[in-house]
Amino acid sequence: MSEVFVEHIVKRKADFKTVLFRILAVLLTVLVFFFGTMFLGMLGITITILIGYLAYLVFVYTSVEYEYSLVNGELTIEKIMGQRKRKFANEFDLKNAEIIAPTFSEEIQNKKTVLLLDYSSGNRSDALYSIILTDKEGSTQVLFEPTEKMLDAMLHVRPNIVKKKV
């Protein structure tokens, strides 16, 4: 049997909470600069530089991408923060999957799930797919955005459960 290996990276859209956090970090930096230099002089500038670095870290670590790796029926998802720090997010065995289909299709909408895991860009587009997995805890829905190549690879591994959009 030939090996199946496909990778894909999806950038997560900044949600309201992320944008608010970034704005607050910049506002804090500006306020510390004005009031710190006014009342503390050089110490205020030093504190502003430290707060500015923290604001930079807020921007870096709220920039999130998900990398999907499909290797012989195992879908591994890793979270990449700031394009430099990689963290294991989850791994799914397609042998345990009931169905892989577009998220807004009837097959997915009719399924009742206990847990929803969102590893997508955050855009509600036609490219959004769901995997329904069943285990001892119940049914889990995984949101992700595969490429056509990844869907074909999944179709090669489990042809009876993959439903591509027409």
Image (cartoon, helix red, strand yellow):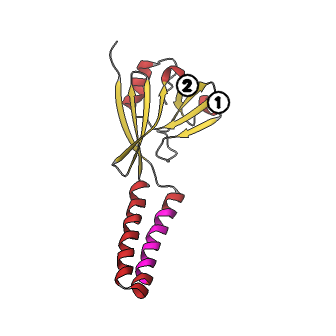
Which residue is at a point 43% across and 87% down the rendered structure image? 39
Where is residue 22 shown, x and y percent of the image?
46, 64
In the depicted structure, whether residue 90 falls above or below residue 49 = above
The residue tagged 2 is: 99
The reply to whether the magenta stretch includes residue 25 is yes
Q: Viewer-proximal residue, 99 or 74?
A: 74
Circle 2: residue type: Ile
Amino acid beneath label 1: Lys
Residue 23 position in % (x across, y down): 47, 67
Task: Give the quadrant of the N terminus.
Answer: top left
Seen as rendered, the residue at the extreme top is: 1
Query: Is residue 46 found left or right of 141 in the rendered image?
Result: left
Res 4 → quadrant: top left
Residue at the image point whose x is 57% and y is 37% from the top: 104
Labels 2 & 1 near each other (Cβ < 8 A): yes
Numbered mark located on residue 111 in the image: 1
